[in-house]
Amino acid sequence: MPFDASCRNQCQPLWSFPTNGTIESSPAVANGMVYVGSDDGKLYAFDANCRNQCQPLWSFLTGGDIESSPAAANGMVYVGTYDSKLYAFDANCRNQCQPLWSFPIGNAILSSPAVANGVVYIGSVDGKLYAFDASCRNQCQPLGTFLTGGTVNSSPTVANGVVYVGSVDGKLYAFDASCRNQCQPLWSFSTGHQIFSSPAVANGVVYVGSDNGKFYAFGISS
């Protein structure tokens, strides 16, 4: 639910909207719209300028719960679901919106998409990280896949031509973001415990947490 960012005391929501499921997805805000997924299987789109009794401009029912957080970039909105599909929508649509395309990945998607340098990256429970052409608008196929040793619930991060992602096999992986075939990691590091945390990169350092209770920081070259 949205709050007034200028409020400093006893702040109340400007409005709220009841979906028919729990919400584990995080909202994405872009071009005057707010997108969020729900465990009722729907992706919801709201007018970001609405301030009272707001209703979705549109929603789309997928085939499974949405724990993945949508990503909005370059006029598109991407989200993964428990029905094992990555969905792509036209961000300019405002009414009765349907996906421009969807792709059935090998297993459920809890990972959230990352968009960088014209490519969409997303992980899957099948243990792979997938890359799609962000300029594709119809019957899109993966450009390439990156294999880890376990479920990928972590969301990828891209920086300096490298895509970073954690895996339930306990490793943080770094892949060449431009790789398109039989991609092997540039390097990986085992924490010894599952990684559900999503890496973050800033000022030449990649950060990630592990289920062993430790927080890791790695120096990376520019």
Image: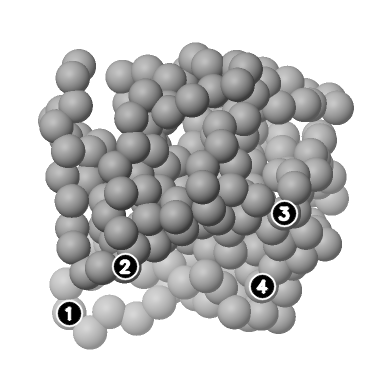
| Viewer-side label of 4, 2 | 2
- Residue 59: in sight, yes or no? no
Looking at the image, do the residues carrying marks 1 and 3 touch, with CB atoms under 8 Å apart?
no
Visual colour scheme: one colour
Query: Where is residue 137 drawn, in percent x and y?
Result: 77, 24
Instruction: Tell me the kind of residue under disc 3.
Output: Asn
User: In the rendered image, which quarter is residue 77 located in?
Assistant: top right
Q: Earlier in the sequence, mark 3 or mark 2?
A: 3
Q: Amino acid at mark 2?
A: Asp
Disc number placed over residue 39 in the picture, else none: 4
Report the disc number at residue 211. 2
The image position of residue 164, as x and y in percent, is: 38, 36
Q: Which residue is mark 1?
A: 9
Give the mark, 1 or 2, whose residue is nearer the N terminus: 1
* Classed neighbour count for the residue bearing mark 1: other residues with Cα under 10 Å, few (<14), some (14–19), many (≥20): few
Q: In screen coordinates, is 178 left or right of 81?
A: left
Look at label 4 and name its amino acid: Asp
The residue singled out by tag 3 in the image is 107
Give me the residue at 46% from left, 58% from top.
168
Crowding at mark 4 (Cα within 10 Å: few <14, some 14-19, many 20+): many
**One can see residue 138 in this view:** yes
Residue 16 located left or right of residue 186 = right
Observer-nearest residue: 47 or 115? 115
Calculate the distance from the C-alpha at mark 1 to the C-alpha at mark 3: 45 Å
Which of discs 4 and 3 lies nearer the camera? The answer is 3
Q: Which one is closest to the eye, mark 1 or mark 3?
A: 3
